[in-house]
Image (tube, coloured by chain):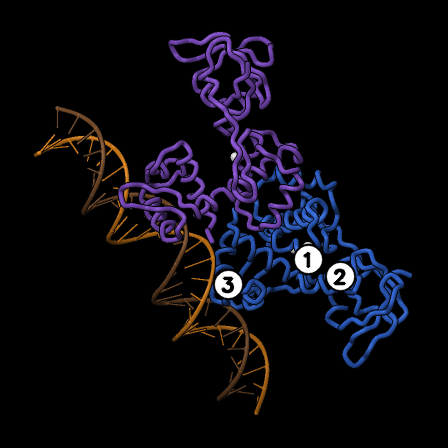
Chain colours: A blue, B purple, C orange, D brown
Amino acid sequence: MLSLVEENYLKTIYHLSEGGREQVSTNAIADAINTKPASVSDMIQRLDRKGVINYTKYQGVKVTGEGQEAALKVIRKHRLWEVFLVEHLNFSWDEVHEVAEQLEHIKSPLLIERLDAFLGHPKVDPHGDPIPDAKGVIRAKPQQPLQQLTVGSQGVIRAVKDSSPAFLQHLDKLGAYLGARVKVIETVDFDNSMQILIDRTTPVFISNQVAENILVEESE
Amino acid sequence: MLSLVEENYLKTIYHLSEGGREQVSTNAIADAINTKPASVSDMIQRLDRKGVINYTKYQGVKVTGEGQEAALKVIRKHRLWEVFLVEHLNFSWDEVHEVAEQLEHIKSPLLIERLDAFLGHPKVDPHGDPIPDAKGVIRAKPQQPLQQLTVGSQGVIRAVKDSSPAFLQHLDKLGAYLGARVKVIETVDFDNSMQILIDRTTPVFISNQVAENILVEESE
DNA sequence: TAGAATATTTAGATTGATCTAAAAATAATT
DNA sequence: AATTATTTTTAGATCAATCTAAATATTCTA
Ligand SMILES: [Mn+2]
Ligand SMILES: [Mn+2]
Ligand SMILES: [Mn+2]
Ligand SMILES: [Mn+2]
């Protein structure tokens, strides 16, 4: 059994290793979780003892099979709650993350399975992130950062990499949302910004950082 | 701001003082919360410093105005979540309390107001307990333990005093539920047990303890 | 009302989670 | 390769929440 804090560490480590990184470093964790490296060093030794990560001194950590299972359970809960908040309690997509950070730690297998059924077994959360099923299986769709599209190519917005209110509210202003069609009008080499069409309306400029955090499914 | 543990202490103290008791004793709290008196002694000094209770050494504690407000917020959340679980996630009334004990600590004013609206501003929880409104106002209906009814008198079950699975499952077996009509057929002086009719079906025997924990609204 | 029983508080320890400061290891750079 | 810079770990403290054992108050009872 993991404590709330341990669950947060584990989830963070899992997310950091999603990018393909083999070993996750102490500093990376400290950064992500807003703690000091000394605290992380302590905690990862505890998590190693609990068998959810493998820790080798000075070499960072790696999530074990058992650890991944636990991490995915937390992530499943987080995302299901986000769906609930948006679909049934009229939350907007920039309001849900913080609350879901709390709800993800509620311990009740019955609750989460009933919630899943109530929601109709959703496949993605309000940010387009896939929801693991009860066994921890994720079906990820092929997506790429909007940044990578070339002039003239088109796609549909499927997810966002960043779930911060600041970013999501910016997208709202741009008129961008999950499912919107986008087309690249122009790319600017100087700063990697681009001009795009969203749903065939007026062209808008987006910065490199924005384009990096929008995930699209390319379409012909 | 109160910690999860502090919220639990405060809620417990509030409930213990509901019965009219002026001062709540250290031992009573320790009992209710399953801790040692020494731990309680420590905690009530902290809660006193935070201004939610008044503590006088060796004389027990009393909830302050501010404390009552905080306690009622937690109770409101607890009961709203119980309604949600029963009405929307198909939980039975004996399964909700434990989960609600966790959910009641989620901190988000928006969430709880949205949940309240989603549920249609319910007035009572699945055990018949009144739900405080956003301002902490409770409208309690006139109720008395079934034990107090005399032979021949009738009433409607409005609430249960005990929310333990054991008790509620027993009521299920008896066919008792909120809203059921009851009529006292016979009372036994020897052990204070009674024979009652539930919804005019076959008479059933209930013990003194059962009769004490069923709250009815008497009717002519 | 004195002594016994009970309730409450204090003292001192422990555990989880965090921090700062210092030490040790690894990585980068002349 | 030697030195410097960076990263990571350890040592020692602190705070919340708990415990056991001992000390102190209050309450009951004879
Ligand atoms: Mn989120
Ligand atoms: Mn999300
Ligand atoms: Mn309850
Ligand atoms: Mn209840």
Q: Are marks 1 and 2 in contact (CB under 8 Å)?
A: yes
Tell me residue B55's x, y (percent). Answer: 32, 46
Q: How many C-alpha atoms fall within 10 Å of the one at disc 3: few (<14), some, or many (≥20)?
A: many
Provide the secondary structure element on which disc 3 rests: helix
Report the chain holding disc 3: A
User: Mark 1 near ligand 1 (CB under 8 Å)?
Assistant: no
Left or right of A156, for residue D21: left
Front label number (3 vs 1): 1
Q: How many C-alpha atoms fall within 10 Å of the one at disc 1: few (<14), some, or many (≥20)?
A: some
Tell me residue A63's x, y (percent). Answer: 60, 56
Q: Are marks 3 and 1 in contact (CB under 8 Å)?
A: no
* Label 1 or label 2, whichever comes before in sequence order: 1
Tell me residue A44's x, y (percent). Answer: 51, 59
Left or right of A39, for residue A84: right
Disc 2 marks which residue? Answer: A172
Q: Can the viewer see residue A66?
A: no
Of the residues shown, which amino acid type is indicated by label 1?
Asp
Provide the secondary structure element on which disc 2 rests: helix
Report the chain holding disc 2: A
- The residue nearer to you, when weighing B129 against A167, is B129
Disc 3 marks which residue? Answer: A40
* Label 3 or label 1, whichever comes before in sequence order: 3
Tell me residue B213's x, y (percent). Answer: 47, 23
Q: Answer with the quarter of the image where residue A184 lies.
A: bottom right
- The residue nearer to you, when weighing B142 against A120, is B142
Q: Can the viewer see residue A155?
A: yes
Quadrant into which the C terminus of chain B falls: top right
Disc 1 marks which residue? Answer: A94
- The residue nearer to you, when weighing A172 against C5, is A172
